[in-house]
Image (tube, rainbow, N blue to C red):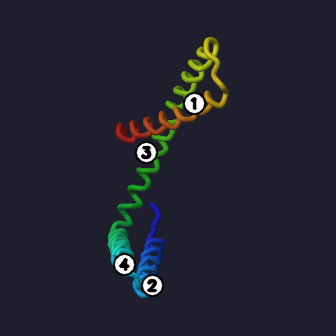
Amino acid sequence: MKNLFIQRLLSATLILLLGFIQINLDASEGFNFGYAMLFIGGIILLISMISYIKSRNNKSLENEMLKEYDERDILIDGKVAHSSMHFLMYEILIIMFLTNFVVIPTNTALVIVLISLIISEFCSRKYYNHAL
């Protein structure tokens, strides 16, 4: 997990600054979106401060959890690649069988393969995240 405190702090101050500028320069009647920007910037600033304070207290626990997560993530990636490879083999065999009877353009076949691989990778990753 990356520490995003600096990025959050910079984005919150930028949003707050833009809100102040918009409030001062906007002379139109009706709702001024500068107040909404100030509110959103304040919320982001508050959340980033709270998460930074919490993360300072949990460094040792976080380092220990990262080791376990890395090992688990490597295992999941291996199982997902294995299941995707089996799925790809079966799909290519089915497409090869179908091309004997139906004319399938190459681009269409490749799009079908890519979309089905994306879906199978997503589903198998969800399954192994839940199962392990």
Q: Amino acid at mark 1?
A: Val
Q: CA distance from mark 1 to mark 2?
A: 51 Å
Front of the two marks 2 and 4: 4
Give the percent coordinates (x, y) of residue 22.
43, 82
> What secondary structure is marked by label 2?
helix
**What residue does disc 3 label?**
72
> The N terminus appears in which quarter of the rendering?
bottom left
Q: Is residue 30 left or right of residue 85?
A: left
Query: Foreground: 76 or 65?
Result: 76
Q: Earlier in the sequence, mark 2 or mark 4?
A: 2
Extreme residue toward the top, this view: 101
Residue 104 is left or right of residue 43, and the answer is right
Label 2 sits on residue: 21
Of tags 4 and 3, which is closer to the observer?
4
Dot label at residue 113? 1
Q: Nearer the viewer, residue 5 or 37?
A: 37
User: At numbered mark 1, what does the secondary structure look like: helix, strand or loop?
Assistant: helix
For disc 1, the neighbor class at 10 Å (few under 14, some 14 to 19, many from 20) is: some
